């Protein structure tokens, strides 16, 4: 499954119709969630029947395409199923009890309610009167059969409206083997340090744009609540946040692609980002680094290009000597690993070597990539130790910028 994204161009009335469709989409989801909370043992089929009741009761719900309403029910049930799954797995901390949405930014259509006129124009045919929209982008939709387009999503962002096409195709890239293995240790001083001693600088996009963000925040606080000028100021702040998030995502994507193309075997840390950001002294820097995005794209490109990626437990990788295996305790401020055996390395490089050795030991024991050279794909954390429960789902995502 890949996602192709276009920016859409339309009239003000059409944008208002999209906003109305998004509000209706949110209304259906929240009503279904309330029905589940109030009911006893409400299952997915009953939510679909309740959606039919909503369409007969509210005219504005009936104006939205029936498949879009079903997609809203599916989003509601997805959050419910995730909550039950977390409870069954007994994950520590909060289990993610479903919440009501108040700022939904997208509406999703299935295979009806829209019509692709040509590769650059799409028309929505339900009673929300969105009408014909122009698609702005470089993707060629004519390359894919229309029956392969399973979902069409309208997304509202700070800089405009976008249309996403979810296409059911698998894209594989055949790359020649490089016979290289690498271990990666992510950090705050350097974005990552590999097992060969090479480092990648941490760009710190949020830190660079923080001064401008504070400026826009001050502008908002000086505007009258509910005024048009305040809405404009909020939009400018949103555009700045959007730019920073895109910079971080593109940086992670670029590095992950380069790492996967250059190595047959990639080992990285299986970090619990949610627990790490509980440290309020480092939370901003950890979120700014974008470790999760980097890991997500490593796993995606690993599957796409037929490389092996392994997530390993990072416990004590900074304390154990990569040369002799002795434990050398050190604080976070100690950046050089010095062992009695004579090994002297940068702390992060020592950790990266330990990560690689630990991953090779695991895979070598199973024989997955050593005994079968034709094996391709991703050995995710669900194989080594299931920490990131949504990892396998993230592999079907395709960036609009690839």
Image (tube, rainbow, N blue to C red):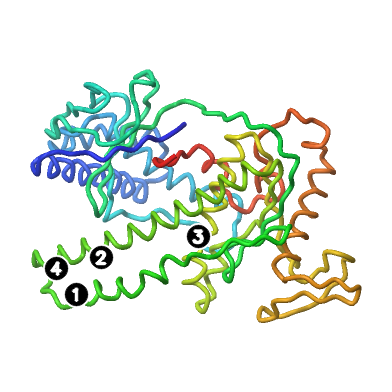
Residue visible at 38% across and 32% down?
166
Query: Which of the two labelled residues, at mark 4 and mark 3, occupies the earlier sequence position?
Result: 4
Q: Which residue is mark 2?
A: 237
Q: Which residue is mark 1?
A: 219
- The residue carrying pointer 3 sits among few (fewer than 14), some (14 to 19) or many (20 or more) residues within 10 Å by Cα, namely many
- Residue 83 horizontal/vertical position (percent): 48, 51
118 versus 400 height, above or below: above
Contact between labelled residues 3 and 1, with CB atoms less than 8 Å apart: no
Query: Which of the two labelled residues, at mark 2 and mark 4, occupies the earlier sequence position?
Result: 4
- Residue 113 horizontal/vertical position (percent): 23, 26
Q: In the shown orientation, is residue 228 left or right of residue 253? A: left
Report helix, strand or loop for mark 3. loop
Query: Which of the two labelled residues, at mark 1 and mark 3, occupies the earlier sequence position?
Result: 1
Judging depth in this view, the residue of 105 and 54 nearest the camera is 105
Using the numbered discs, state the Cα–Cα distance from disc 4 to disc 3 in whole angstroms. Answer: 30 Å
Using the numbered discs, state the Cα–Cα distance from disc 1 to disc 2 in whole angstroms. Answer: 9 Å
Query: Which of the two labelled residues, at mark 3 and mark 2, occupies the earlier sequence position?
Result: 2
- The residue carrying pointer 1 sits among few (fewer than 14), some (14 to 19) or many (20 or more) residues within 10 Å by Cα, namely some
Corner quadrant of residue 376: top right
Contact between labelled residues 2 and 1, with CB atoms less than 8 Å apart: yes
Q: In the shown orientation, is residue 121 left or right of residue 276? A: left
Rendered image: mark on residue 230: 4
- Residue 238 horizontal/vertical position (percent): 27, 61
218 versus 155 height, above or below: below
Q: Which residue is mark 3?
A: 290
Residue visible at 16% across and 37% down?
57
Report helix, strand or loop for mark 2. helix
Using the numbered discs, state the Cα–Cα distance from disc 1 to disc 3 in whole angstroms. Answer: 28 Å
Report helix, strand or loop for mark 4. helix
Judging depth in this view, the residue of 176 and 317 nearest the camera is 176
- The residue carrying pointer 4 sits among few (fewer than 14), some (14 to 19) or many (20 or more) residues within 10 Å by Cα, namely some
């Amino acid at each position: 499954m890949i996602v192709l994204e276009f920016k859409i161009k339309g009239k003000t009335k059409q944008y208002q119709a999209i906003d109305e469709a998004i509000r209706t989409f949110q209304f259906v989801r929240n009503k279904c969630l309330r029905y589940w909370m109030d009911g006893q043992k409400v299952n997915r089929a009953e939510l679909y029947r309740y959606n039919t009741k909503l369409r007969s009761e509210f005219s504005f719900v009936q104006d939205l395409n029936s498949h879009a309403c079903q997609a809203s029910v599916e989003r509601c049930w997805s959050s419910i199923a995730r909550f039950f799954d977390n409870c069954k797995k007994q994950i520590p901390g909060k289990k993610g009890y479903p919440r009501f949405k108040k700022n939904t930014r997208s509406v999703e259509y299935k295979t009806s309610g829209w019509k692709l006129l040509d590769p650059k124009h799409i028309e929505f045919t339900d009673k929300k009167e969105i009408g014909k929209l122009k698609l702005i982008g470089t993707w060629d939709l004519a390359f894919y059969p229309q029956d392969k387009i399973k979902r069409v999503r309208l997304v509202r962002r700070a800089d405009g409206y976008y249309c996403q096409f979810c296409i059911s195709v698998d894209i594989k890239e055949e790359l020649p083997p490089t016979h290289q293995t690498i271990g990666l240790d992510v950090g705050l001083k350097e974005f990552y340090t590999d097992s060969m001693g090479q480092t990648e600088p941490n760009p710190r996009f949020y830190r660079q744009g923080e001064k401008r963000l504070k400026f826009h925040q001050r502008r908002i606080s000086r505007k009258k609540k509910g005024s048009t000028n305040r809405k404009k100021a909020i939009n400018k702040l949103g555009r700045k946040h959007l730019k920073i998030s895109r910079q971080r995502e593109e940086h992670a994507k670029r590095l992950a692609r380069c790492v996967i193309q250059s190595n047959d075997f990639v080992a990285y840390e299986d970090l619990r980002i949610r627990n790490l950001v509980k440290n309020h002294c480092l939370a901003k820097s950890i979120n700014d680094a974008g470790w999760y995005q980097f890991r997500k794209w490593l796993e995606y490109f690993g599957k796409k290009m037929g490389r092996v990626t392994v997530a390993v437990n990072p416990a004590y990788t900074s304390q154990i000597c990569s040369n002799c295996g002795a434990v050398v305790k050190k604080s976070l401020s100690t950046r050089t690993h010095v062992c009695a055996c004579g090994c002297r390395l940068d702390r992060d490089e020592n950790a990266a070597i330990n990560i690689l050795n630990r991953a090779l030991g695991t895979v070598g024991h199973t024989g997955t990539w050593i005994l079968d050279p034709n094996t391709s794909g991703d050995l995710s954390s669900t194989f080594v130790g299931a920490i990131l429960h949504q990892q396998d789902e993230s592999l079907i995502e395709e960036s609009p910028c690839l």
